[in-house]
Image (cartoon, rainbow, N blue to C red):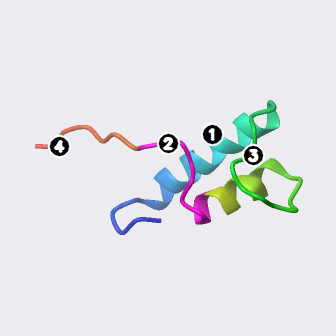
């Protein structure tokens, strides 16, 4: 998790990726895990998740 990423952003990324995996998306790392959320967590730790967070401009 980057220094400026909130735990909510991390949870959103993990949830979105787990849903993709559950629907058959290819796994981006070598893993022995079978549960989508655990695979997503390993991908997050390996910094290979295909997501970016765009924040609104808060003036």
Which numbered disc, 2 or 1, marks the residue closer to the eye?
2
The image position of residue 5, as x and y in percent, is: 39, 59
Under circle 4, the secondary element is: loop
Disc marking residue 58: 4
* Magenta stretch, residue numbers: 44-52
Instruction: Name the residue furthest left.
Output: 59
Corner quadrant of residue 50: top right
Under circle 2, the secondary element is: loop
First in sequence: mark 4 vs mark 3: 3
Main secondary structure found in the magenta portion: loop
First in sequence: mark 2 vs mark 3: 3
Q: Which residue is mark 1?
A: 16
Q: Nearer the viewer, residue 52 or 27?
A: 27
Disc marking residue 59: none
Q: Which residue is mark 3?
A: 27
Q: Are marks 2 and 1 in contact (CB under 8 Å)?
A: yes
Q: Are marks 4 and 2 in contact (CB under 8 Å)?
A: no
- In the image, residue 17 lies in the stretch drawn in magenta: no
Under circle 1, the secondary element is: helix
**Residue count near mark 4 (Cα–Cα under 10 Å), binned few <14, some 14–19, many ≥20:** few
Q: CA distance from mark 2 to mark 1?
A: 9 Å
- In the image, residue 49 lies in the stretch drawn in magenta: yes
Q: Which residue is mark 2?
A: 51
Q: Are marks 2 and 3 in contact (CB under 8 Å)?
A: no
Horizontal side of residue 6 vs 50, given as left or right = left
Which numbered disc, 4 or 3, marks the residue closer to the eye?
3
Under circle 3, the secondary element is: loop
Q: Nearer the viewer, residue 2 or 48?
A: 48
Q: Quadrant of the C terminus?
A: top left
The image position of residue 49, as x and y in percent, is: 57, 49
Which numbered disc, 2 or 3, marks the residue closer to the eye?
3
């Amino acid at each position: 998790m980057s220094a400026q990423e909130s735990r909510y952003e991390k949870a959103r990324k993990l949830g979105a990726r787990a849903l993709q995996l559950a629907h058959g998306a290819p796994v981006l790392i070598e893993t022995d895990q079978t549960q989508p959320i655990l695979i997503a967590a390993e991908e997050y730790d390996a910094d290979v998740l295909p997501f970016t967070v765009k924040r609104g401009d808060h003036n």
